[in-house]
Image (spheres, coloured by chain):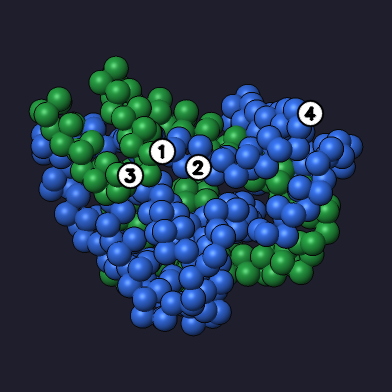
C-alpha cells in the first residue's frame, strides 16, 4: 500500500483534536475514529495499525494513548508524538471536567436517559465491527497459507477468548502474552506450504 | 492530601496497569482507604468517562476533578500521560527484531489474541448495554453500517441517540 507523505505538526494536532473532541461515548468510538482517519489519510497500513494496537496492549497505561503516541511518533518523531497526544487529551480532558461538573444536573433528564439507551447498544456494534476489521488482514493471509494454518489462527483466537471468558479475573496481559507464545509454538510447528507467499506479504507490510 | 500525593497516586495506578479502566482497582483500594474519595465519586467519574469524548480512561481526570478541582484534573491527566511513553521502548525493541520469524509468529499470535479479547469484551459489555430486542437491533444496525465503512462513526452514534429518544422516551 502506498503511504502518503508526512503531515505537518499542525495537521497532526488538529487531526487528533477532531478525533478526541467528536468521539462522545468513550473509548470505542475514539478507537474507531483513529482507525478510520489514519487509514483514510494513508498515514498507516491496516497491518501496521493492528501491530501498533497489539503492542499497545502489553505496555502500561491507557491503550488509546499508547496507540496515539506510536502513531504520532511514526509520523514525525517526538514532536509528532507530543502534537498527537496533546490533540487527543487536552480538549477532551477539558470537556470531561466540564461534564463532571454538569453531570449531576442532567443525569436524570429523561431525554438524556433515552438517548443513552440507543447509544450504548450502538457502541457494542461498533466494537464488534472493529474486531471484524482487525481480523480481516490476518485471516486473508492465513487463507492463502492453507487449511491447517487457517485452523491454527482460529484456534488461537478462540482459545484466547475462552480463557478470558472462563477465568474473568485473569490479566489480559497474561492472555495476550500467551497468545503470542502460542503463535511461536504453532507457526513453528506448522510450516506454511506457501511460505514464499508469506515472506512476500511480510516484506510488503 | 497534597497535590504531589495526588499525582503520585494516579501515576502509580497508571504505571502498574494497562487499559483505560485498568487503574480502577488500585485507585479504588487506595483512595477509599485514605478517605480521599467516596464510592459515589467513582461511579460518577466512570459514568462521565464513558460519555465524554476521548478515551474512557479519561475517567481518571473526572475523578481528579472531584478530588481537587481543576488542579486535581490536570495532575491526573499528567500522571496518565507519562506511563504510556514506555510503549516507545516496546515498539523500538519490536522494530529492531521484527525480521526474525519468531517475532513475526509472536506478533501474529498476539494480534489474534487481541481480536479474541475484543469479542469477549464486547460480549460482556453487551450484557449491561443491550436491555431488549430493540437494543439488539440498534447494535446490529451499527455493526452493519460500520463494517460497510460507508457511514461515519459520528453519524452512526447520532442515529443511535435519535433511535433511543424515539423508542424509549
Badge 1, how many Cα within 10 Å: few under 14, some, many 20+? some
Assign a secondary structure to mark 3: loop
Relative to A16, say whether B104 is above or below: above
Which chain letter goes with mark 4? Answer: A
The Cα atoms of the two marked residues, 1 and 2, are separated by 7 Å
Please say if the residues under marks 4 and 1 sit with CB atoms less than 8 Å apart: no
Tag 3 subunit:
B
Kindly state the secondary structure of the residue where label 1 is placed. helix
Identify the residue shown where x is 33% and y is 37%. Answer: B145
Residue A70 appears in the rendering = yes
Asked if badge 4 and badge 3 are on a common chain, one would say: no
Say whether marks 4 and 3 touch (CB < 8 Å): no
Residue B108: image tag: none
Disc marking residue B150 = 3
**Above or below, A204 relative to A5:** above
What is the spatial separation of the Cα atoms under label 2 and label 3, in whole angstroms? 14 Å
Residue where numbered disc 1 is placed? B147
The reply to whether the C-beta atoms of the residues labelled 1 and 3 are less than 8 Å apart is no
In the picture, the quarter occupied by the N terminus of chain A is: bottom right
* Mark 4 on the same chain as mark 1: no
Residue located 35% across and 27% down the image: B140
Q: Where residue A131 sits in the image (x, y, percent)? A: 51, 39
Q: Colour of chain B?
A: green
Residue B30: x %, y % from top left: 50, 53
**Chain A as rendered: colour:** blue
Label 4 packing within 10 angstroms: few (<14), some (14-19), many (20+): some
Residue at the spot of label 2: A133
Q: Secondary structure at mark 4?
A: helix
- Dot placed on the residue nearer the N-terminal end, 2 or 4: 2
Q: Quadrant of residue A137?
A: top right
| Marks 2 and 4 in Cβ contact (< 8 Å) | no
Amino acid at each position: 500500500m502506498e503511504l502518503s507523505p508526512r503531515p505537518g505538526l499542525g495537521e497532526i494536532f488538529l487531526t487528533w483534536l477532531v478525533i478526541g473532541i467528536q468521539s462522545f461515548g468513550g473509548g470505542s468510538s475514539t478507537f474507531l475514529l483513529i482507525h478510520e482517519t489514519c487509514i483514510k489519510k494513508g498515514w498507516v497500513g491496516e497491518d501496521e495499525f493492528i501491530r501498533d494496537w497489539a503492542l499497545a496492549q502489553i505496555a502500561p497505561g491507557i491503550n488509546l494513548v499508547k496507540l496515539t503516541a506510536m502513531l504520532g511518533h511514526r509520523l514525525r518523531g517526538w514532536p509528532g508524538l507530543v502534537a498527537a497526544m496533546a490533540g487527543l487529551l487536552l480538549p477532551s480532558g477539558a470537556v470531561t471536567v466540564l461534564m463532571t461538573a454538569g453531570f449531576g444536573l442532567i443525569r436524570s433528564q429523561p431525554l438524556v436517559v433515552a438517548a443513552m439507551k440507543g447509544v450504548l447498544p450502538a457502541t457494542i456494534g461498533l466494537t464488534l465491527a472493529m474486531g471484524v476489521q482487525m481480523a480481516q488482514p490476518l485471516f486473508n493471509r492465513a487463507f492463502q497459507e492453507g487449511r491447517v494454518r487457517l485452523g491454527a489462527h482460529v484456534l488461537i483466537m478462540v482459545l484466547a477468548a475462552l480463557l478470558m471468558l472462563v477465568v474473568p479475573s485473569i490479566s489480559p496481559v497474561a492472555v495476550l502474552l500467551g497468545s503470542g507464545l502460542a503463535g511461536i509454538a504453532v507457526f513453528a510447528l506448522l510450516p506454511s506450504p506457501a511460505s514464499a507467499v508469506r515472506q512476500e506479504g511480510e516484506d510488503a507490510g | 492530601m497534597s497535590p504531589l500525593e495526588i499525582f503520585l497516586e494516579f501515576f502509580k495506578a497508571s504505571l502498574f496497569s494497562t487499559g483505560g479502566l485498568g487503574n480502577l482497582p488500585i485507585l479504588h483500594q487506595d483512595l477509599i482507604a485514605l478517605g480521599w474519595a467516596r464510592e459515589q465519586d467513582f461511579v460518577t467519574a466512570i459514568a462521565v468517562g464513558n460519555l465524554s469524548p476521548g478515551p474512557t480512561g479519561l475517567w481518571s481526570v473526572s475523578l481528579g476533578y472531584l478530588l481537587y478541582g481543576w488542579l486535581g484534573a490536570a495532575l491526573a491527566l499528567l500522571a496518565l500521560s507519562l506511563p504510556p511513553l514506555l510503549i516507545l521502548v516496546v515498539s523500538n525493541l519490536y522494530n529492531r527484531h521484527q525480521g526474525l520469524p519468531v517475532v513475526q509468529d509472536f506478533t501474529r499470535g498476539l494480534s489474534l489474541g487481541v481480536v479474541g479479547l475484543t469479542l469477549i469484551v464486547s460480549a460482556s459489555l453487551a450484557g449491561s448495554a443491550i436491555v431488549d430486542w430493540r437494543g439488539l437491533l440498534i447494535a446490529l444496525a451499527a455493526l452493519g453500517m460500520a463494517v460497510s465503512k460507508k457511514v461515519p462513526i459520528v453519524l452512526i452514534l447520532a442515529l443511535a441517540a435519535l433511535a433511543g429518544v424515539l423508542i424509549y422516551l
